[in-house]
Image (cartoon, helix red, strand yellow):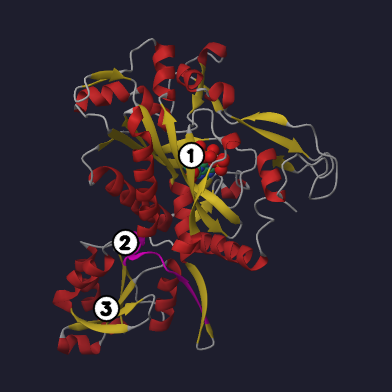
Amino acid sequence: MANDQQVADDQELDSLDALVSLCKRRGYIFQSSEIYGGLNGFWDYGPLGVELKNNVFDFWWDAVVRQREDVVGYDASIIMHPKVWEASGHLGNFYDMMVDCTECKRRYRTDHLMRDLGISELPKECPNCGGELSEPREFGLMFETFVGATKDSQSVAYLRPETAQAIFVNFRNVQMSTRMKVPFGIAQRGKAFRNEVTPRNFTFRSREFEQMEMEFFVHESEERQWFDYWREARMQWYLGLGIREERLRFREHDADELAHYARYTTDVEYQFPFGWQELEGICNRGSFDLSMHNKHSGKDQAYFDEARQEKYVPSVVEISAGLDRTVLTVLVDAFAVEQINGEERTVLRLAPHIAPRQVAVFPLSKKLGEQARKLADELQRRFNVLYDEQGSIGKRYRREDEVGTPFCVTFDFNSLDDGRATVRDRDTMEQERVALDALAEYLADKLAPR
Ligand code: ATP
């Protein structure tokens, strides 16, 4: 058995199954078009999922754009001139090799098949059923569409397979309008589309997904220094998301797996239940992209560096992360099932600053509903808050643990006299009495990124 899913060990596979079910049950992630049987490789984010996704993205934008003077943001259209993809090399190079089993009809990506079996030559037999495998063939990853009223070869366009090219073709516009000087970067978040051979492992490999990419333009002599800088910065960012350090690692690409544009690449990988897998590629693309667009468009992409008194086409250090993949990673990393006093507790230990619901407010009894709701309304101005008066306090705690709410605040009868409420910490389950007028500051401090 040899695909991504099958190499996982049972216990951890179970936990991915349990996570998938939690995501559906609690409104994180649903299968797209579920009532029609779903569409393989497409996913929807529910009310909690969209908050989590936005929080992860905001954390990225803050670190990569807002807190820096040398990176600016961008938001490009998804469909671009088809010549972009000719120049970038995607039309000629962007395919995967695949084989089909003639017996069980299972389809494999050849590189994944060899990687999972730990071999360097394609096997002749299907690892699933022993049937004969077909000859390898190319599988184009670009989704095609048509622009305008006619549907012919003249009107073919593509859904972008990466966001990066929009940044390259707008390099001169952005540089001249902002007067940024090399070294500087352009960042964007956006949808990308790949007709993947084998979408699988929940949202890990989807056909429609979002990327967070930043292209950092540098002088050729500084490629290595900036590459090392961003490599380290990116690892720190993942740690800042609260992901366990021992489940993160770097992996350098071997020469034979480098993309056609890459001089060298390091991936950030995470140890999923189905093995170590890429979260992000950090790549020295050299001046490949700008030079190709220079050639194909006939528009000069060179930059005049006043400090160096030199005109050149800059090199690019790229950081390219998957937003959906990062969301999946924080969910997998946060998910735990614990035994407490003979009872099972499912908890999502999301870092408080990315938790979709930050605070839940409970009245101990419905009789205290009015005061507790007033408190929830006040906190709602600053945080994402749920007010809940249904069920026992224990049940309400468990419901919030399962969606990862870091703090629950209970308003009880004593609160009427002492002006304090009980704050319960999701992870330690410890409880603390906090003065109502100091509560917002107390929570803001606990919810801030560490
Ligand atoms: P792979 O080898 O796994 O197909 P890749 O090396 O082609 O991935 P890149 O082109 O480097 O991926 O894309 C940058 C990032 O975009 C990846 O690190 C990943 O986080 C995300 N990404 C790429 N393809 C997908 C996908 N099909 N589904 C979800 N995220 C993806």
| Mark toward the viewer: 3 or 2 | 2
Residue pictured at 26% horizontal, 29% vertical: 182
Three-letter residue code for mark 3:
Gly
Can residue 134 be seen?
Answer: yes
Mark number displayed over residue 265: 1
Which badge, 1 or 2, comes first in the chain's sequence?
1
Disc 3 target residue: 369
Above or below: residue 346 compared with residue 66: below
Q: CA distance from mark 3 to mark 2?
A: 28 Å
What is the magenta range? 344-358
Q: Residue at x 19, y 22 (%)?
A: 306
Q: CA distance from mark 3 to mark 1?
A: 57 Å
Q: Would you call the spot at circle 3 few (<14 residues within 10 Å), some (14-19), or many (20 or more)?
A: some
**Is the C-beta of the residue carrying label 1 under 8 Å from the nearest atom of ligand 1?**
yes
Disc 1 marks which amino acid? Answer: Thr
Give the residue at mark 2. Answer: 353
Task: Quarter of the image for the C terminus: give it.
Answer: bottom left
Front position among marks 1 and 2: 1
Q: Secondary structure at mark 2?
A: helix
